[in-house]
Image: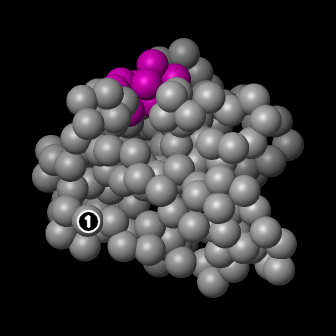
Amino acid sequence: MIRSHLLQVMALVMRDLPLNFDRGELPALTVHVLRSTRIWDDDPSTAVIRCRCAAGNLDGRSLPAYTTEDGVDPANETETFAQVTLEVDIWRWSDVPATLRSGKAVGSPRQETAVTFRRPPHTYSLLGGDPTISVLGDAAEEGWRSVEDILDAFDSGAAPLRDYRAEARGRQPRRSGRATTL
């Protein structure tokens, strides 16, 4: 979810205004943002959190631990929650953390991007199949490059897999020092 969707939304929000609204410039601006993206402070041990849902209650329903669900191999260490704080190294977003978060059974599901910015001089539709905002090959490649350090942190143990309880209060795993608080 982070690589396939959230990085694309982040790039859409953080890219510069195009001089022309054409099939080449908009994707190039997206790639520029993704090329400029790196893990906050170059430290995955503090900028990346990954967890796996343990048993709990959500909206009055008892939910099992993810690892006990049918077809799930606990040895695969598949996370059900991930959070990464990134930095986009371009002048407009210098020293501004961009936190991307995705998970299941964390309560109060939200799909939001919260940013305050000025109205641009041009507007365009995000819907309706406009190919100028589609993910092209180079944007997909840069998206993968952007998450390689995250995946390496998973593999090396720098971002260890933790458990969290399913619950309706909307609390999400957060790092306090080196520990994850829930």
Total count of labels:
1
Q: Nearer the viewer, residue 114 or 76?
A: 76
Secondary structure of the residue carrying numbered label 1? strand
Residue for point 43% across, 25% down? 144
Q: Nearer the viewer, residue 120 or 72?
A: 72
Q: Nearer the viewer, residue 147 or 31?
A: 147
Left or right: where 96 falls relative to 14 = left
Query: x and y percent of residue 74 in the render?
Result: 56, 34
Residue for point 63% across, 83% down? 169
Q: Residues within 10 Å of mark 1 (few under 14, many from 20)?
A: few
Query: x and y percent of residue 150 in the render?
Result: 33, 36
Query: Which quarter of the figure is the N terminus placed in?
Result: top right
Res. 6 in view? no
Q: Is residue 145 magenta?
A: yes
Task: Locate residue 8: give its quadrant.
Answer: top right
Query: Which quarter of the figure is the C terminus placed in?
Result: bottom left
Q: Is residue 127 magenta?
A: no
- Rendered view: 178 above or below 102: below
Secondary structure character of the magenta stretch overall: helix
Query: x and y percent of residue 42 in the render?
Result: 15, 44
Left or right: where 110 falls relative to 25 = right
- Residue furthest top in the image: 137
For label 1, the residue is 179
Res. 152 in view? yes
Query: x and y percent of residue 71 in the render?
Result: 75, 29
Residue for point 75% across, 51% down? 125
Q: Amino acid at mark 1?
A: Ala
Q: Nearer the viewer, residue 19 or 79?
A: 79
- Residue furthest front in the image: 68
Which residues make up the magenta segment? 139-149
- Rendered view: 106 above or below 124: below
